[in-house]
Structure formats: C-alpha cells, structure tokens
Amino acid sequence: MTAGERTVPGPDPDAVAEVVRVALAEDLRYGPDATTEATVGVDVRARAAITPREPGVLAGGPVALAAFRAVLGDDVQVRQVVPDGSVLVPGEPVLQVDGRAGGLLTAERTALNLISQLSGVATLTRRWVDAVAGTGARIRDTRKTVPGLRSLQKYAVRCGGGVNHRLGLGDACLIKDNHVVAAGSVTAAVRAVQAFAGGLPLEVEVDTLEQLDEALTCGAGLILLDNFGLAATAEAVRRARTHGERTGRHVELEASGGLTLDHAAAIAATGVDYLAVGALTHSAPIVDLGMDLTADQG
C-alpha cells in the first residue's frame, strides 16, 4: 500500500445494486441510448479509463464498476487500479473497463455521477479529519444524507477517514430537543428510551450546560452538545471529566451545530470525542472524474 491509501471494507452490495438500478432506470426510462445506438456499431469493443481531473480522495470505485456490469453483464472486464480511500492524482486512471463500446457509453454517466459524488464526500471528510489530526477527536457523519444514497455516502465517509453515526432510526437512539419536549424532560426521555430499547446505543442531545448536568446525572454515556460555543464546549468537557472521575464512568461528548473547518481544530482541542458534521454528506462538492474511451474498430 502506498502513501495516501486506506484499507476500507467495501460498500453494502445490496445498496450498490439498488442505487445502480435506480440510476440507470432514470437514464433509460424513455427508451434505449439513442445516440450511442446510432453512432456505435454493436460489435465495436473499447477500453475505458476513468481518470480524475482534480485532486481528491477516491470513493465509489466498486459502485462505478457495478454500473458497467449492470449494462454489459458478463461481457465486460473491470479493474480498479487503486483502492477506495486513495489520494487522487489528476491524470492517473483509477478504473479501467473493457467491453462493448455501446455498453460502456450507456453506463458512463451513471458510473461517473456516483463515483464523483462519493469521492466528493470522501474528499471533504479527509479535510475535516486532517483539520483535527493530533487532537484525538474523530469526525462523524449524520443522517443528513441524499435520499437513497445514505449507505453509500456513509461508506464514502469511512473512505475519507471519518466514522459513522447511526444508519437509520432503528439501530441506535438519539434523544433530540423535540423528544425532550414530548417526554417532559431529559431524564424522562432517557428513562423512556432505556425502558423501550435498552439494548440499543443511546445518545442525548443537550442545548445548555444545565441539560448537560441532567444528562450526566441520569446516566447518559454519550452526549451531543448542540450549538455550544467554544467556551461552553470546554466547560462541558470539564464537567463530564469531573463526573467521570467521581463515578468511574467515562462519558463521550460530541460537538455539533455550526461547526466549520476553520474552527474544527479549536473545538477538537477542548477534548470532545467527536465532531458531528452534516456537511460531509449534504454539502460535499463532487470531484471531477471523466471517462476516456479508446475504441477498437478492427
């Protein structure tokens, strides 16, 4: 493995298949690829290389390759040149595909849309991870994802060096401000969740230091600090550590709301365990990757 590469378990195959199916259906809902069928002979074979036009971090190679396989079936050879999580070097191909030229062109936009979007998420995540390097804090995503792409976007976050929060509403519990209002208090909400879903991970969102104290008292093990300023975040860390020293139980803290790259290091340096960044998935710009085709007319 070279510098800049990361070993990341592949994306969920079922999620990949479903996303590719829906994306191809969008392109083909009005009929076959008329331009390609008109200009490319059915027997023409070609090699395609997907190449970055700008720096970034790669994510979504298996997804792009799945798009080509979905169109070409067994009549395709695909190879990922560098693994997801690698640093992209402009002009150096990351994927190579050999097959019928018509199929390559039909799948091109679907493959590029997905790999470009996911690489954008990985690239932005890496910037945040680099910004807090050395502090011990980790960058974590949220459920602010593009509908239908959550599993793949969260995979891209991992490619960028971040960690995932919950994938949905049933794999972990997060008590937010509206849950507190509905339950009557932080304590009431915590007790209700513990009684209903005691086996699931539980996190409590707090808006004030007073709510933090209440969450600590009722036994919360992970607390989200919503829109705390720098000074309030530092005070929250101090209180959580004091509580831990007194009870012998470590409480993790997650900063969230209004975070920016410019201030990420300062927030992380307070001692929080996580920075929750919705922008990783809802605002990441794509990375420009293109496909270059070499056709064999012989």
Image (cartoon, rainbow, N blue to C red):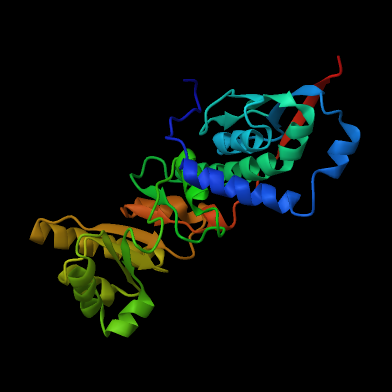
Where 282 sits versus 226, above or below?
A: above
Where 184 sits versus 77, above or below?
A: below
* Residue 158 percent across, percent down from the top left: 45, 42
Residue visible at 33% across and 55% down in the picture: 270
Q: Which of 136 and 78 is in front in this view?
A: 78
Where 116 sits versus 241, above or below?
A: above
The answer, for residue 57, to whether it is visible in the render is no
Q: Which of 136 and 6 is in front in this view?
A: 6
Where 79 sits versus 183, above or below?
A: above
Residue lying furthest right in this view?
38
* Residue 61 percent across, percent down from the top left: 58, 34
Query: In the figure, is residue 141 to the left or right of 200?
Result: right
Residue visible at 74% across and 54% down in the picture: 29
Residue 166 picture quarter: bottom left
Residue visible at 46% across and 30% down in the picture: 6
* Residue 90 percent across, percent down from the top left: 69, 29
* Residue 161 percent across, percent down from the top left: 44, 40
